[in-house]
Amino acid sequence: MRRFIPFLPKPAVVPVIRLQGAIGVGSRGLNDQTIAPLIERAFARGKPAAVALVINSPGGSAVQSSLIAARVRRLAEEKKVPVHAFVEDVAASGGYWLACAADDIWVDASSIVGSIGVIFASFGFPELMARQGIERRVVTAGKSKSFADPFLPQKAEDVERLKRLQEPIHAAFIEHVKARRGARLDLSADLFNADVWVGAEAVPLGLVDGVAHLRPKLMEIYGEKVRLIPYGQKRGLLQRLGMAATDGVLQGVEERALWARFGL
């Protein structure tokens, strides 16, 4: 019918970008290099009524989180397109950083959000190496080159230095959340201690805007005939066949550890 009556209004179109998994470098990681083409195409699709982000991420790299969020904001402002975020299981740490790139954030009542903090995690092996008769030999130019070496006993000065490195990253995260959430935040609450909340609890704190799911909410905003166009990362042939390279296997172990923090 629209072919013959061109003045009939077209249904609103909303590209839906899935941001799934741990945030970091590498073929498996959710990072700016891999996700940038999807984001660019979504905003370039004619004149979309909005762009939706579907987020399911336990976090990861602060830098990659910042790069992806900055790209979303730049395109949203250039194209004057609103952005809505919908959280599935979890948007924690870097995942919440991504969610804050949207103009509003919607969650399931049982989603996990927050973790506005920074973590450095490693392992230490000096006693195991000593029992096995393994000698660690390190030669450096620059006294800090062996900083936080997992094969050496932990040093108090290394711990202090790590904390000093984390402080500006944490401050940048807090500033990003405040800038994006603004007056909606309940700043009388202790929001920035890396705690997490379930979705329904996060609403009165201003961390999210409400409990709602993707299609019903977008139908409410843009009409019952709204068209949702999915955009998601494609896995390579080796990944689809379960034949990932060694670095992909290691990344997978790290990603499982991130998800496990939230019981997932």
Image: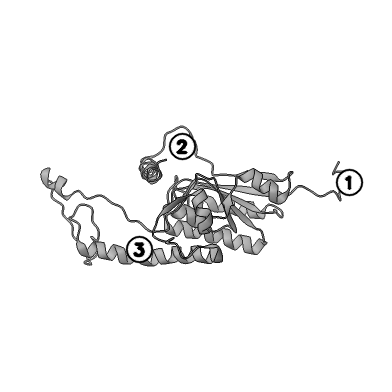
State the separation of the CA atoms marked 2 and 3: 34 Å
Point out the tag, 3 or 1, that comes first from the N-terminus. Answer: 1
Vertical comparison of 49 with 248: above or below = below
| For discs 1 and 2, the disc positioned in front in the rendered view | 1
Q: Quadrant of residue 144?
A: bottom left
Amino acid beneath label 3 = Gln
45 or 201: nearer the viewer? 201
| For discs 3 and 1, the disc positioned in front in the rendered view | 3
Q: Which residue is mark 1?
A: 5
Does residue 241 appear in this view? yes
Task: Identify the residue at image location x=71%, y=55%.
Answer: 47
Q: Residue 123 placed where, x, y %?
A: 25, 49
Label 3 environment density (alpha carbons within 10 Å; few <14, some 14–19, many ≥20): some
Does residue 68 appear in this view? no
Point out the tag, 2 or 3, that comes first from the N-terminus. Answer: 3
Label 1 environment density (alpha carbons within 10 Å; few <14, some 14–19, many ≥20): few
The label shown at residue 239 is 2
Q: Which residue is mark 3?
A: 166
Query: Helix, strand or loop at disc 3?
Result: helix
Query: Helix, strand or loop at disc 2?
Result: helix
| For discs 2 and 3, the disc positioned in front in the rendered view | 3
Task: Identify the residue at image location x=49%, y=36%.
Answer: 237
Amino acid beneath label 1 = Ile
Quarter of the figure with the N terminus: top right
96 or 149: nearer the viewer? 96
How is the model colour-coded?
A: one colour
